[in-house]
Amino acid sequence: MSEFIFALLDNRFLQIALLAGLLASIGCGVMGTFVVVKRIAFMAGGIAHSVLGGMGAALYYHFDPLLGALFAAIVAALFIGTVRLQWKAQEDTLIGALWAIGMAIGILFIAKTPGYTTDLMSFLFGNILFVSPRELWLMASLDVVLVVTVAVFYRQFLAITFDEEFARLRGVPVAFFYLLLLCLVAITVVLLIQIVGLILVIALLTLPAAIAGHYMRELASMMIAATLLGSVFTTLGLGVSYQADLPAGPIMILCAGCVYIISAMLRHLLIGYRARRYAIRALRD
Amino acid sequence: MHINPAILIENVSFSYGESRVLEQINLRIASGEFIGLVGPNAGGKSTLLKLILGLLKPQVGRIEVLGQTPRQAAQRIGYVSQFPTFARDFPITVAQVVAMGRIGMNSSWRWQRTANQHAARLALAEVEAVDLAERHIGSLSGGQLQRVLLARALVGKPKILILDEPTANIDQRVEGDIFQLLATLNQHLTILLVSHDIAFISEYVSRVACLNRTLIYHDTDAVDDQIISQLYGGHIRRVTHRHVIHE
């Protein structure tokens, strides 16, 4: 690992990659928490995969793929959100359809674009070392948008994620804030696709928040813990991949996945231990 | 002098598609009244509550709450639902849940947060649950959770309290405590309570509204076996019982 730390000091690619990982962690910590507590991982998956359509079209028409991704993600978020709010029935089938259609459109566009193979792989699995300084600035800007929006509307987001019916009764415009939340998830997906690609994006979006959820009793502290965990996983993944000459994205996800499984087992044992302790105490009393 | 009723329902009918759920409902609830709403499952109780709360709009007839439309009056209604509509593992403390009852009443700036926290403490004190403030919502028993949800309904200082089967998931001892609490709250609130236990609520409410698509209401003393049989259908007999409340 010391080799990685020394390399960080004078390797500009690695410095940018590290910063990109840290910036992505902010998005994954803040919005991943909402995705986990609201149980909308499948929706986030639908948004992530439909992004390929936007990326492919942008590439074909010579726009920035990141902007194409952002546009497609927000359109998909609004569409999925509206379907869920208005239609309700067959919501999962429609998300699945959008998921597949988005990918199919993307693959067709990429197939018609010369030199597509490398780009397709980096879209699907990400490559943190390909992040340019300009993309770094875009990621930082998106993080600012996320954090400021969540800070300003924290109570409304808390209300609609905790108890949608009660929020509606208190006069909170639930549909507006629900769609806004999905748009912020869409922005986060675009942030994370740079790092781990759209196949693995759901894992990085949900695993740090899910681990934090095992231990935190408040939403805000869950966000902070998830951000810190995300930073650890991206940095660790980058370091291990540099040492072992492996792709960074899968290493990050493996780290997060292993910690999640260990944490879930520990939590299960802890709950069992506490239940036994209470039962013994109740018998004594 | 004409005094507006707390809730006024005139000739309200409502259907889901082709299925008529409510037919020509008329109900006038006076300010300060404690009224029980009973009836069989699928008799339209929850739909009537949703109409009063402004979550649904009547297709025929009109509803006034405190002299306004239900949506306009929403901030002055406290509501406790039958089942918690949230995940019990959500990362949130009791104090935060209760403070959520003030959302829409003020902004989220820091000085307002302090006011919300203070109001949440007062509401928890009102339902004798202030010691639960820092507990995680998932760690509460059924009775504790019901008190917390009652505090969430009360924190916005409502004029009307609406409860949908508030004691459906708790044991009889706690049920008695909750009803005693409601009787105390009735000193300054109008209360509309949906319940399945017609005999038990008769001890507390001043009037019982019986709903099975149409609505008939009675003084509590007038609810007899014949009325219950008509309401629920079939041979149903009321068994009078008293709940023993342990100290």
Image (spheres, rainbow, N blue to C red):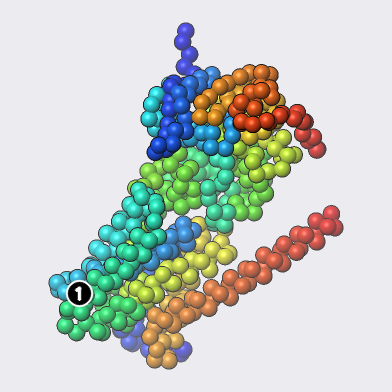
Q: How many marks?
A: 1
Q: Could you tell me which secondary element the residue under label 1 belongs to?
A: helix
Q: Disc 1 sits on a residue from what chain?
A: A
Residue at horizontal 63 percent and vertical 34 percent from the top: B196
Place of residue B165 in the rendered image (x, y in percent of width and height, measured from the top left): 60, 37
Q: Residues within 10 Å of mark 1 (few under 14, many from 20)?
A: many
Q: Say above or below: A226 vs B200.
A: below
Residue B68 appears in the rendering: no
Q: Nearer the viewer, residue A245 or A224?
A: A245
Rendered location of residue A244, percent (x, y): 43, 92
Q: Pointer 1: what residue?
A: A109
A173 above or below B126? below
Identified at 34% across, 73% down, the residue is A198
Residue A136 visible? The answer is yes
The residue sitting at the top extreme is B1
Q: Position of residue A85 (x, y in %)?
A: 37, 49
Residue A282: name its quadrant: bottom right
Which residue sits at x=31%, y=64%? Answer: A98
Residue type at mark 1? Phe
Q: Which image quadrant: the C terminus of chain B?
A: top right
Q: Quadrant of residue A76?
A: bottom left
